[in-house]
Each structure stands twice: as C-alpha cells, then as structure tokens.
Image (cartoon, coloured by chain):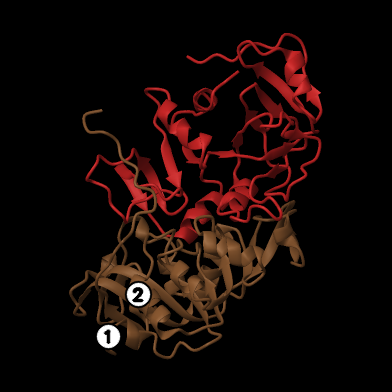
Amino acid sequence: MINKVVSGAKEAIDDVSDGATLMLGGFGLCGIPENCINALVEKGVKDLTCISNNAGVDDFGIGLMLKQRQVKKMISSYVGENAEFERQLLSGELEVDLIPQGTLATRCLAAGYGMPAIFTPAGVGTEVAEGKEIRNFGGKDYLMEYAFDADFAIVKAWKGDTAGNLIFRSTSRNFNPVMAMAGKITIAEVEELVEAGELDPDYIHTPGIYVHRIFQGKDYEKRIEQRTVRKSGV
Amino acid sequence: MFTKEEIAQRIAQEIKDGYYVNLGIGIPTLVANYIPKGINVVLQSENGLLGMGPFPFEGEEDADLINAGKQTITTLPGSSIFDSAMSFGMMRAQKVDLTILGAMEVSENGDIANWKIPGKMVKGMGGAMDLVASAKNIIVAMQHVNKAGESKLLSKCTLPLTGVKCIKKIVTELAVLDILPEGGFKLLERAPGVSVDFIKQSTAGRLIAEGDIPEMRLD
C-alpha cells in the first residue's frame, strides 16, 4: 500500500499555488483544518478560490487568510460571523458566491461520486436560480447544479492511518467527508495518525483511496464559537 | 400580545409524538424548551446530528459537538451523527416531519424572505433555502410587525426570497395564521387581549377572518 504520510502542513500544502481552488472542511470553527490554514497563511499564497461552508471568524480559521487578502473568491452558505469578510464583500474587494448549504454539500458529493451535476429544489424562484437550468420532475421544479471542480480538498479528521483512511469525531464530521472525496488532491490532517491496520475497516468514514496526503496535526486550538452551558443540578 | 417564549410555547403544541423536527435559529430554538411531556421528538441539527440534547454542563463542553447555531450541545441516547450531504439528503427526501424557522417577511401566497437585506446584511442563506424547498411542513415563527410598526405579513415580499409558496403556518406575537393554498392569511387564533381589528391593521397582505376567532391557549 502506498504510504501517504507527509511531515506536516508545510509539506502538505507546498504545491498550492496562486489562483488555486481549495475546498476547506468544517462547519463554523468546528472541524476546520487548523494546521493547513496556518500553513497557507504563512506561505502567503494568494488569489485563492475557497469553497467552505463558512469563512471563519476575524482572527481564526479562514478569517486569517481573508485578513491577508489571500482570498479572491469565497463560495459559502453562511458568512455571518466575520466582520472583515463583510467589509471586503460590501467594498467589492472580495467576490462571493453564496449558495444553499445543502447545495454546497451535494455539489461536493457529486464530485466524489463522479456525477457531473445534481438537481435540487433549493433556490427555485430565488436569485440563486438566475441563469441556471430548471427541470421539472413529477410536477416540481429543480435547479441543475454542477459538481465542484477543486484543485485541493483540505480536511481535518480525528483519526487516520498511513493508507489515508479517515474517521471523524462527532459533529466535526460535517463537510469533511464529502470534501475529502471531491478534491483532485485531498490533504487530510488528523489528531491521531496510526499505522495501516490499526483502524477497524468497518468504522472507516472516508476510504483512503480519496486521500492523497495525510499528516499528524499538532497544537489544535479547537476554538468554540458559542459556548453555551446549563447549570449543574438543574 | 405574546412574548418570544410564548410564540415558541404555542408552536410546540404543533409537534406530534414521533416527529423528527428541525429548529432554526432564534425563536425556533426556544421551541425545544416547551415540547409537551410524554412526547418523543428527535431534533435534527443540519450540521449533522439527529437527537440533539440540551446544552452541556459547565466544564463538559466539547468543541467537536455543536448545533447549527454553533452552540455547544450534547447528544441523547439514540443520537446519530452524519455528514452534511446526508443531513440535507434526509431533508430533501422529506424524512424530517416538521421545520420551524424564522422569517423577515412572508407573503400571502407562502413565499418567505429571511436571508438577505440588499446593501446591508449579507450573511447568507445557510440551510434555509434547502429546508423551505423540501420540508413537507413548515411553521414560521416571526414578529408580525417590525420595530417601526410595519407589517411583515405582506401581499408580496420586498426582500430577496428564500423560497416560494412553501409556508403553511405562521405564529406571531399577535396571531396564529394558516396560508391558504389559494393564497391569503387565514386567521385561526389571536393572542390574548389582541382584537381581530388590530390584527387586520397589522397585516398588509390579505387577511381572512371568519366567524369567532378564539384566543390562543397555552397549556
């Protein structure tokens, strides 16, 4: 079996060049590839198109790349938590394609399943439908949406092995498995990297065939956006 | 007139035993606090969880376990976790029984606008467009009038649409209304102390008020 292990984030993203299209996993700040984002910030690569459900916050996640003006275009469903993003968008510095969340996920899925397009009712009759082909099935209208075409998919998993198999933890799974399937080159950073054979094949979420590079991540901050708790004993 | 909590409490009465329910952000989130005793409901969070539980106890927060509002939450016995594509797949396939969400405007033919104010707010639609396009039953929790006293129940939405002809029921601080298949807001119940005339004045779209309109009751 091919050994897909690289030394770290710097090596993993070394061939990401200006103008590349990247998919970045995560929902809010949950399950984002922190190590690779930091390495992309350090590398200073620019004119990127980023496909990611959200755009981080001002000082964490994709927000760090926005601050350095590395992003030319964002393709996201919700960007409400980032003031710098909103400023760049309203001033016209940043191109933004806001698309429904299910459409975003399913366009990733289509790419990973080798399907050129999907049909979804999301956005019919709204500005999202402008310029798109509409087909009627069983009396209901659907929009044709194309599979994504991304140079790199960058995801974060809980556990991974040297063959590239991935297991995600809790709701940090979110977009990570569908994006992992969708990149021409998929890079996975994991909290715990083990030898092939140590993970039970029955419990693999993403088969290693989809993953080209994997590395043991470090120093995870795992920031919480909205810390909500209840009092004990209530 | 109803408070936000009372709107949530009234909507909770619409939830039936065995329902899978998706709750949006804002007033809809509060509905979880009022689910009637003895009713089994599974809450779906569109970031990839069925069986959403309450907030964790202090010190037990898990950064990997959040809801669609990015709040720390817990799972319950019987919970399951899945990816975002499957999450929207189960909505599209109408496996989720009821969706409760907020709105900025609703029109008398069931159109909804809740994601964008041109030139002002550009947060995005998140999962709202997918939800309204696919859900078999949607209840909107919203304010009947804005802070300036202008109606948000209109003959036609003025803001960019989230979905068309998809809303069937609305609960506001003033009233419970159905949207008729042929169009129009049919007044079903009024909030305590609110007159039918006041609801008429507060509704810019076509209001249909026939016979005696009872007061909303919270059990």
Could you tell me which residue is drawn at 35 percent across and 50 percent down? B80
Total marks shown come to 2
Could you tell me which residue is drawn at 58 percent across and 61 percent down? A86
- Horizontal placement of A132 versus B169: left or right? right
Position of residue B103 measured from the top left corner of the image (x, y, whole percent): 63, 40
Residue B200 visible within the image? yes
Q: Chain of mark 2?
A: A
- State the quadrant of the N terminus of chain A: bottom left
Q: Badge 1, how many Cα within 10 Å: few under 14, some, many 20+?
A: many
Residue A128 in which image quadrant:
bottom right
- The chain that appears red in the image is B
Position of residue B153 measured from the top left corner of the image (x, y, whole percent): 73, 32
* Pair 1/2: label in front: 1
Amino acid carrying label 2: it is: Pro
To the question of a shared chain for discs 1 and 2, the answer is yes
Amino acid carrying label 1: it is: Val
The residue nearer to you, when weighing A139 against B129, is B129
Q: Residue A207 has which mark?
A: 2
**Colour in which chain A is drawn:** brown
Position of residue A12 measured from the top left corner of the image (x, y, whole percent): 35, 85
Cα–Cα gap, marks 1 and 2 = 15 Å
- State the quadrant of the C terminus of chain A: top left
Q: Secondary structure at mark 1?
A: loop
Q: Residue A5 has which mark?
A: 1
Could you tell me which residue is drawn at 54 percent across and 55 percent down? A80
